[in-house]
Image (spheres, coloured by chain):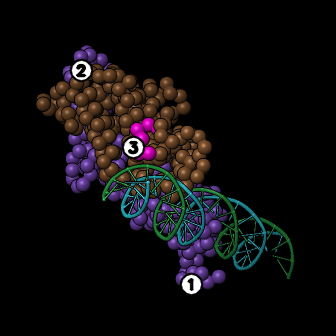
Chain colours: A purple, B brown, C green, D cyan
DNA sequence: GGTTAGTGTGAGCGCCGTTCACATGTTAGT
DNA sequence: ACTAACATGTGAACGGCGCTCACACTAACC
């Protein structure tokens, strides 16, 4: 015993049982590791080390590494949702939409490792937390699109918008698009969103289909 | 010696030196592992095992695991380019563009592990092979966009289009969008592309800015 | 107070990436 | 042709990883 000598006993947030709430402590530890050292540093053992327990302890709370990653991803989704809401409470013009898009990409670039855990890893696609969180994002985007473009096909357009912004995030994240300064990124994202939303049918040989 | 008893000696493609061209053999082995077992199965040791050499041999040709991954990614880029060119040699309408988009997403879903190596991994962003290949993709998309939308801002619109398609690929890959049947995916991609390219300015409160 | 279930421990398995001293085969200089 | 230099592959080793299992402790319940 006496591995930990401080009062890490009862007070951790949302403790569901008596001593220590390791479950939550592991998620925080994992998030810290992610912010500090990127995805490379995130291992079950490292998280356990940081939480002050033996390497095997996490398995009492998470079936395997992927399960912990899913929990981490879930808080990532929540934080992304908050971040977007902060960027604009209820976007209803293309400019508002562009602002939200910029925020989405900024989140990805500010917390690349977390973003990659949320989206880049194939793990536990079907975890309940994950599908719920992504469904929330989808409906959020859907609501925006319906406000901005009431006459368009909401399903197609909202997946398109999400994909556009998501793609911009990943392309910047992977260095396919220059992301040296935040301003340049913001400008590019904004320009891309506006460009795609102002392509007039006049540019195409086909006649416009009135909705 | 006699570790390998077959004729794996001189004939491997593009052999630059005397016996075996391990460099290329490792890439093929890595590609095979990727197709067979996903990203989990891809390790330097496994590739070396499959190539019939000791675990340390690869380090004569690749500085580390990431370097091998970059080489794998490079062939992935080439194959993606071929695949897109096959889908449509010189797209010039929105329908052509949608067809290419569908091909892009289909490639991602047919070879998910390879696609993830190409885009999902943060490794060796600055490897020469990688930047060359992605530059090729960018200019390819740029050419299409210029043919389809001669009056639009080519830079903004082509990054937007690439991001849109790339985002669609990743969202399907990660299960954020249902990808149970190829047809459903193709329909969704096509719809998204068309939706985003037919949003008329009439839907927005702002007056159109003539270019 | 004693049983029982929930939690954490410690040792251990096999795999991984990576390094290093060494062996081998190829090439080049004379 | 002989040797020196070099390029390539070997084998053992290190530490870290995910994961499992038998065991110890501790809280809770009867």
The secondary structure type at the circle numbered 3 is loop
Give the camera-side residue of A68 and B92.
Answer: B92
Residue B27 place in picture, x, y as percent? 46, 44
Residue ID for mark 2:
A204
Pair 2/3: label in front: 3
Q: Nearer the viewer, residue A44 or B36?
A: B36
| Mark linked to residue B16 | 3
Please say if A69 is above or below A48. Answer: above
Q: Chain of mark 3?
A: B
Q: Which mark is residue A103?
A: none
To which residue does mark 1 refer?
A: A5
Q: Nearer the viewer, residue A18 or D18?
A: D18
Residue B22 seen by the camera: yes
- Give the alpha-carbon distance from disc 3 to disc 1, as whole Å: 62 Å
Query: Does the magenta run of residues contain B13?
Result: yes
Residue at (38, 24) in percent of width and height: B86
Give the foreground label among 3 and 1: 3
Q: Residue at x 59, y 46 (%)?
A: B4
Query: Do the residues at discs 3 and 1 belong to one chain?
Result: no
Would residue A122 be visible to someone looking at this image?
no
Highlighted range, magenta: B12-18
């Amino acid at each position: 015993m006496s591995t930990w000598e401080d009062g890490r006993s009862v007070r951790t947030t949302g403790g569901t049982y008596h001593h220590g709430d390791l479950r939550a402590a592991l998620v925080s530890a994992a998030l810290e590791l992610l912010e500090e050292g990127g995805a490379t540093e995130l291992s079950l053992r490292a998280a356990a080390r940081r939480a002050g327990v033996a390497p095997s302890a996490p398995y009492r709370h998470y079936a395997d590494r992927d399960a912990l990653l899913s929990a981490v991803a879930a808080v990532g989704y929540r934080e992304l949702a908050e971040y977007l809401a902060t960027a604009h409470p209820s976007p209803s013009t293309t400019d508002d939409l562009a602002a939200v898009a910029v925020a989405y990409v900024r989140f990805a670039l500010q917390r690349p490792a977390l973003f990659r855990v949320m989206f880049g890893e194939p793990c536990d696609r079907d975890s309940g937390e994950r599908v719920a969180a992504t469904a929330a994002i989808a409906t959020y985007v859907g609501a925006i699109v319906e406000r901005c473009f009431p006459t368009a096909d909401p399903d197609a357009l909202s997946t398109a918008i999400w994909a556009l912004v998501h793609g911009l995030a990943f392309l910047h994240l992977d260095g396919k698009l220059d992301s040296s300064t935040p301003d340049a990124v913001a400008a590019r994202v904004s320009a891309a969103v506006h460009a795609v939303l102002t392509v007039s049918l006049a540019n195409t040989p086909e006649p416009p289909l009135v909705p």
